[in-house]
Image (cartoon, rainbow, N blue to C red):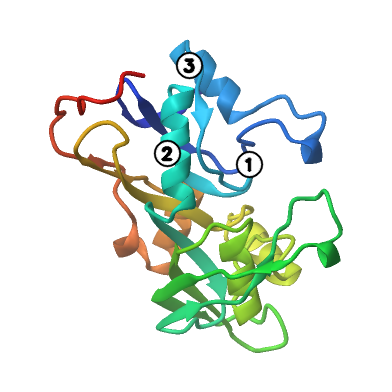
Amino acid sequence: MPPLNVLYQDEHLVAVHKPSGLLVHRSALARGETDFLLQRLRNQLGRRVYPVHRLDRPTSGVMVLALSSAVAGRLSEAFSERQVEKRYLAVVRGKAPERERLDYPLREEDGTRPKSEMPAMPTMTDIRRLDSVELPVQVDRYPVARYSLVEARPLTGRRHQIRRHLSRRGYPIIGDAKHGKSVHNRFFAEQLSAPRLLLAATHLAFDHPLFDKRVQLNCALDDTMVALFDHLGWAGHLPLDSVRTPPPTTPTALETL
């Protein structure tokens, strides 16, 4: 099993590229699974790691984890208080709007209670169309098929928020078995060699919980999405796999974790 690609690491936190299809941790909804990001990374680093946010199993991209429970608490608070800048790339059906804020309220999907018992919560996602393509093939009922490359910036953190917002707006993400359309998913899987959810977390930025600096994490797309972007003429939108952060500084006087 290949090691996870570490994008950033210091004595308090680590960021990795989570592959599509890899569960972050054990879940009651995925009994019988034996491969998890937490276990892999713990074995790779030889120490315990603590998750502070989540990515859906089929979503790939940058994920940050703490190396102590105290740092995990600080980072989790930053995520919950919307102090983390997040950027995703998604391939969607149709020609998406040039720019729009989606604010459909969403019910939490935790699998423990009927949806009717879950209150609808306010949510916001900013989307921007980066590119689009029209293919001369009949995938659905129309003689041509249109798809868009969308940048999504979630301003809140509900489960499946980007997937549900784009689907609700009429532009489901390709490869989304739950919120998408199977005929387009099959077309990308069988004709374009892209059998996965085409959603990737490409950027995270946040204030370091202990150092006086801003951490900016950028994550490359996986081979499947890179090949697809090349095929569709979107190579100019490929993100770089890099970290831009000022040189390390002395920890602030207060916390010793």
What amino acid type is highlighted by mark number 1? Answer: Gly
Residue 56, can we see it? yes
Q: Nearer the viewer, residue 85 or 78?
A: 78
Image height check: is 252 above or below 79? above
Sequence-first disc among 3 and 2: 3
Is the residue under label 2 in contact with that under label 3 (CB below 8 Å)? Answer: no
**Cα–Cα gap, marks 1 and 3:** 19 Å
CA separation in Å, label 2 and label 1? 25 Å
Secondary structure of residue under mark 2: helix
> Mark 3 against mark 2, which lies toward the viewer?
2
Front-lying residue, 95 or 170: 170
Return the residue at label 2: 75
Residue mark closest to the camera, 1 vs 3: 3
Could you say which disc has been placed on residue 21 in the image?
Answer: 1
Q: Quadrant of residue 255?
A: top left
- Of the residues shown, which amino acid type is indicated by label 2? Leu
Using the image, determine if residue 109 lies above or below residue 37. below
Q: Is residue 211 left or right of residue 34?
A: left
Residue bearing the label numbered 3: 44
How many C-alpha atoms fall within 10 Å of the one at disc 2: few (<14), some, or many (≥20)? many
Residue drawn at the location 67% of the way across and 89% of the way down: 142
Q: Could you say which disc has been placed on residue 39 in the image?
A: none
Q: Secondary structure at mark 3?
A: helix
Q: Residue at x 73, y 66 (%)?
A: 119
Is disc 1 placed on a helix, strand or loop? loop
